[in-house]
Each structure stands twice: as C-alpha cells, then as structure tokens.
Image: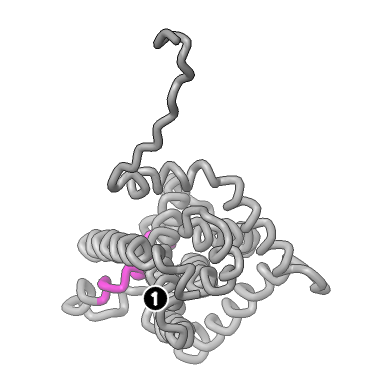
Amino acid sequence: MSSADRPSSTYLVLEAGRADRQYWPDIWRYRGLLFILAWRDVAVRYKQTAIGIVWAFIRPFLTMVVFTVVFGHLAKLPTTGGIPYAIVVIGGLLPWTLFSSVLSEASASVISNGNLISKVYFPRMIVPLATVLVVMIDFAVSLFILGGLMVWYLIVPGWQLLLLPFFVLLALLASLGPAIWAAAIIVKYRDFRFVVPFVLQFGLYVSPVGFESAIVPEQWRLLYNLNPMVGIIDGFRWCIVGGASPIYLPGFALSLVVTAGFLWLGISTFRRIERGFADLI
C-alpha cells in the first residue's frame, strides 16, 4: 500500500499551559450558558411574587426616603450647590446598590451552583458573571426613580450625563473584584459567607451614600478614597448635577487604582482556587 493510500492519522497534542490560554476565549464560547444562568436567576427571584420586578423599584425608593429623613431633615447635613437632598441620596444609593448587589449575589453564586460545577466543564467564572446581568435589570428599573426625581425638582442634566454609563461600568468593576475573590474564598472557607453582609452593612455607612464626600476634612479626603466607591459615587453625582457636585480628582484617581488592584486580586485568586472547586464543593 502506497503512502497516499494510507489513512491519515489523528494526533492528540498535550501542551502545557494551553488550558490557561484558552480560558478567556472559552468564556466567550460559553456565553450562551451565561445568559441561561442569568435568565434562570431572574425567573427564580420573581417567581410567585405578588408585584414581581416592582420590588426593584420599591427597595431603593424606601431606602432613599429613610436616608433623606434621617440625614437631610433630622441630622440636617449640608449639600453643596443647593442640591435637593433626595438627589444627593439617590445619586449615592444607585451606584452603591449596584455594587452591593453584585458583591452579595456573586459571592454566593459558586456554592449555590455546586451541582452544576461538580458535573460539567465550563469556565467557572461564568457563574459569578451571570449575576451581573440579573443585577443590571434591577438597576435599570431603579433609574426610573432618578428620572422621576429630576423631573420633580426641575433638574436639567448637562453634558456630563453622557458619561453616566462609564461610572456604571466602574461600579460593576469595583464590585467584581471583591465578588469574584469572595466567591472563591467561600468555597474554601464556608463561614466567610457570613462576613460579606457585615462588610456591606459597614460599607454603606462609610461610603458617601447619605452624604457628600465634601464634608470629610480635606486632610482625610485622599485616605477616604481608598474606598473605591467614594470616587465612583462622586462621579455618579457629578453626571447628574454637573458642577454643583464636583469630582475630587486625586481621590478619584486613587479609587481607580484600588478598583484595578481588587479586580486583579479577585481574578488571580479565583483562577488559582477554581481548579479544585469540584473537590471542595
């Protein structure tokens, strides 16, 4: 038999590091699974509820009312540029709620999908990423509160409003780093899931949600921006009311650095621990 008549051979090549190089392209290939998981979470969240997705409107609205009464009317905290206190609160509450919701739900996502992770291969990072799509639906509904308040107080936004999606993206990135890190750590140390709600509760009061960061003494403002949500919340408010609530640029730059650092830490920790998820779960 001539060499031309011989059947072609198939070779299996094992190449060190190939799985790591294919990890991010695999996330794109499995994007359908990401959307399926997100849609499942949306359906489960609002299944057998009386008012459904309206809860995404009610929760931030009631929180805004409480903060406005406590900080605006009882504590009488000042606002810059004569901004209505309800606008100050909603401008801080929306990005904070986005941040806290992603961190809360994504951190517990790997454990709650343990059966899927132990049986089927796919890039595990898809699981916490799917929660982002769910949270974004709630966030989009909450934006109606912001629009209604701006109409009520006759606030006309400037060109800065065009940059609002940029600060929304920053809030997502700021939450993803700690969320992905916590999702991996909770698989290894289950009791850590009790720490996340405490950290979020503490973070709500040390972040400028019910007040403006300008009330922090000048000598402490840069240190205060080690909390990455400080610069992001300031930027969110700036997009709404413009120069009446300016951005503290050195602090904003520091917030970006801290956000990038947490994102790197989260991804690197998750990638290191996820190889043993199936055994740990």
- Indicate the quadrant containing the N terminus: top left, top right, bottom left or bottom right: top left
Q: Is residue 225 magenta?
A: yes
Is there any visible trace of residue 234 in the rendered image? no
Q: How is the image coloured?
A: one colour
Q: Looking at the picture, how far across and down is residue 97, in whole percent?
A: 52, 70
Q: Looking at the picture, how far across and down is residue 269, in whole percent?
A: 32, 66
Residue sitting at the far bottom: 74
Residue at x 56% of width, y 85% of height: 69
Residue at x 26% of width, y 72% of height: 226
Is there any visible trace of residue 186 in the rendered image? yes
Q: Which residues are magenta?
A: 224-236
Tell which of 85 and 226 is nearer to you.
226
Looking at the image, how many numbered discs can be counted on the residues?
1
Check disc 1 and report its element: helix, strand or loop: helix
Q: In the visual, does 256 lie left or right of 32?
A: left
Q: Looking at the picture, how far across and down is residue 51, in whole percent?
A: 80, 70
Tell which of 137 and 165 is nearer to you.
137
Instruction: Classify 10 Å Cα crowding around label 1: few (below 14), some (14-19), many (20 and above).
Output: many
Residue linked to disc 1? 185
Q: Looking at the rendering, which quadrant does residue 119 occupy?
A: bottom right
Q: Is residue 116 magenta?
A: no
* Residue 216 vertical position relative to residue 17 in the rendered view, above or below: below
Residue sitting at the far front: 1
Residue at x 54% of width, y 66% of height: 118
Tell which of 225 and 86 is nearer to you.
225
Q: Looking at the rendering, which quadrant does residue 137 occupy?
A: bottom right
Residue at x 21% of width, y 76% of height: 223
Q: Looking at the rendering, which quadrant does residue 233 occupy?
A: bottom left
Residue sitting at the far left: 219
Of helix, strand and loop, which mostly describes the magenta segment? helix
Q: Looking at the picture, how far across and down is residue 189, in whole percent?
A: 41, 83
Q: Amino acid at mark 1?
A: Ile
